[in-house]
Amino acid sequence: MSTLEPKYHIPGPKSAELLALSDTYEPGCTSQQAPIVWDHAAGCRVWDVDGNEYIDWTSGVLVTNVGHCHPQHVEYIREQAGRLLNPYDFPTPERVTLARRLVELTPDNLDNCFMLTTGSEATEAAMRVARRYTGRHEIISFWGGFHGRTYGAMSMAGKMGTKKNFGPLMPGCIYLPYPYCFRCPFRLHPDECGFFCLEQFADRIIEVSSTGDLAALIIEPYQGGSGFIFPPDGWLSRLQEWAKERDLIFILDEVQSSFGRTGKMLALEHEDLRPNLLCLGKGIGSGVPTAALLAESRLMQSLGPGEMSSTTGGNPLSCAAAHAVLDIMAEENLPENSRRIGEYMLGRLQKLAEEVEVLGDARGKGLVIGLEFVKDMESLEPAPDITEEVIMRCCERGLLVGKVGFYGNVIRVAPPLVITEEQAEQSVDIMAAVVRSL
Ligand SMILES: Cc1ncc(COP(=O)(O)O)c(C=O)c1O
């Protein structure tokens, strides 16, 4: 059957029944976008409860980096589950050896680790450490930034959707423009702007927003929630210097971008960044809730014993999952697969963007690619309706995609990093057929 023709009627009867139950008993529990209910998954494939099979471009929203139910991952988790689940106040071999592996994986200024369970906990923890160490309270973040949904993390969001009607927020949040070059608010081009947003504009915002008590700056290497937006080359290293010049703690939020996603183990490797605090999450457990804060020991020492704690942080099951992820990443060289397959997919998707006007932009690194849909290239007016149409048409043809973005008009291309050449080709064929049919 041609990839142009729909294969499935969405939702199938079993999915429809379970979605109705979900709407009744846990409405809004997910931001599930294609109306299907997942049953099981393997590698880069997902099956719904009606038996329909999809190639997955979501990775369960950038989590299952080593692929769904990777046999080695499952084996480590099974073995650990039968041995020890949670000793809370006591270290375990899995925890201490994982801490060492994470410290060894990250830049050498980061010599301490603290284990947590969710990404929001990691960004909250980073802000706590930065405030305690500096004795100051203001934290800079960026327009469109996303760092989680707990109160501190939410307060740092530069995205109205995350915090609307949840005020008052944490005091001391200051927001600077992020280089969303496709929609530059200053109407400048990255090749000749001289990083205007940072060099000419940031201090003006600080002048009118800060009480003179700046502690830290938190940023994602690319903006995930706002639409896979990548800063121009060199911008992040310049930002790191800029933060140093102002005596700010530099917090890099790699909850989403780490563990091979951008074609390197950590996104900071693209520009040799050396943050003072680094937040990890999502892909570190590849589906088992796990997160970590990596820190310079001089910063961590500002906290006393037990001042930062989490009941399930560093639990043996999460640590076993993270050990499996590290082993699989190395044995299968997944960051390199991410780089190589990502380059192929991005190349084809960029050609598609040149051909079809409503696909305004295709951008990315490794296996994190954003497809931004617009009404036309002159107005660049966001087209969330077209984006939704793409999601449904892809789903009917066996490709599972989701949308994201400041305007809800960006399709995520973020398959598990184990995606094969054949799956990449087949799935881009489906997307190309759908986009051409709009
Ligand atoms: C960059 C970033 N930081 C923090 C978080 C929050 O992580 P969690 O949902 O695990 O709390 C996310 C989640 O999407 C994220 O993308």
Image: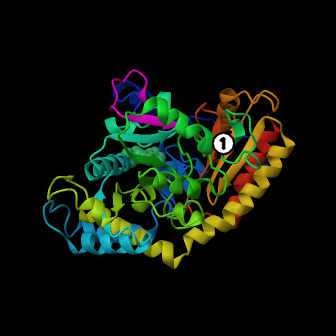
Residue stretch rendered in magenta on the structure:
163-177
Which residue shows up at 37% across the image and 70% down it?
102
Mark 1 is on which residue type?
Answer: Phe
Residue 436 picture location, percent across and down: 82, 40
Which residue occupies the extreme right position in the image?
Answer: 355
Which residue is at the front of the view, 423 or 259? 259
Label 1 sits on a secondary structure element that is: helix
Above or below, 199 relative to 33: below
Which residue shows up at 32% across the image and 46% down it?
124
Which quarter of the rendered picture does the C terminus lie within? top right
Q: In the rendered image, which residue does mark 1 sit on?
A: 196
Q: Is residue 314 visible?
A: no
Q: Main secondary structure of the magenta part?
A: loop
Residue 80 picture location, percent across and down: 26, 69
Q: Residues within 10 Å of mark 1 (few under 14, many from 20)?
A: some
Residue 404 picture location, percent across and down: 57, 38
Q: Is residue 40 left or right of residue 271?
A: left
Which residue shows up at 70% across the image and 29% down it?
383
Which residue is at the front of the view, 33 or 185? 185
